[in-house]
Image (spheres, rainbow, N blue to C red):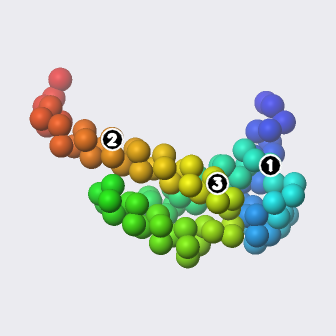
Amino acid sequence: LPEEVYIIVFQHHERISGEGFPQGLKKQGFHLLAQIVALANEMDHFLADKIITSEQIAKELSKQLVIDFLGKHELKLIKKISGIVSELANEMSKMKDSPDSGKNG
């Protein structure tokens, strides 16, 4: 496996604030790909038990950014992943509202 894979696996619980583990890394030494996976992992945990509309997702993500993610993760990554989640929610909403969504086959 590429070296980056090992780094991502090892660092995906780190936070740029230094509050993560196993090394308590701050931004320096925290691999960008590991930062992306760490943020995606937290977003996944945050959204896992929620069944909400895209508008609600945007509101919840905004609150969560202020409460928890800001300071732990890079703002540019938070914005990027939040945008991806919002886009996915919008697509899911469109699929749900589609006239074909209840048909099988």
Circle 2/circle 1 CB separation < 8 Å: no
Q: Report the amino acid beneath label 2.
A: Glu
* Residue at the image position 57 percent from the left and 49 percent from the top: 80
User: Total marks drawn?
Assistant: 3
Q: Is residue 14 above or below residue 6?
A: below
Image quadrant assignment for residue 49 = bottom left
Nearest-to-viewer mark from 3 and 1: 3
Which x, y percent locates residue 69? 61, 67
Q: Crowding at label 1, few (<14), some or many (≥20) Cα neighbours within 10 Å?
A: some
Specify whether 21 is left or right of 70: right
20 with respect to 89 (left or right): right
**Which is more N-terminal, label 1 or label 3?**
1
Residue that carries the numbered disc 1 in the rendered image: 31
Q: Where is residue 46 in the image (x, y as percent from the top left)?
A: 49, 63
Tag 2 secondary structure? helix
Q: Name the residue under label 3.
A: 76
Q: How crowded is mark 3: few (under 14 residues within 10 Å), some or many (20 or more)?
A: few
**Residue at mark 2:** 91
Residue sitting nearer the eye, 66 or 42:
66
- Quadrant of the rendered structure where residue 101 is? top left
Note whether residue 22 is visible.
Answer: no
The residue sitting at 25% across, 39% down in the picture is 95
Q: Nearer the viewer, mark 3 or mark 2?
A: 3
Q: Position of residue 83 (x, y in %)?
A: 49, 50
The answer to which of marks 2 and 1 sits earlier in the sequence is 1
First along the sequence among labels 3 and 2: 3
Q: Crowding near pointer 2: few (<14 within 10 Å), some, many (20+)?
A: few
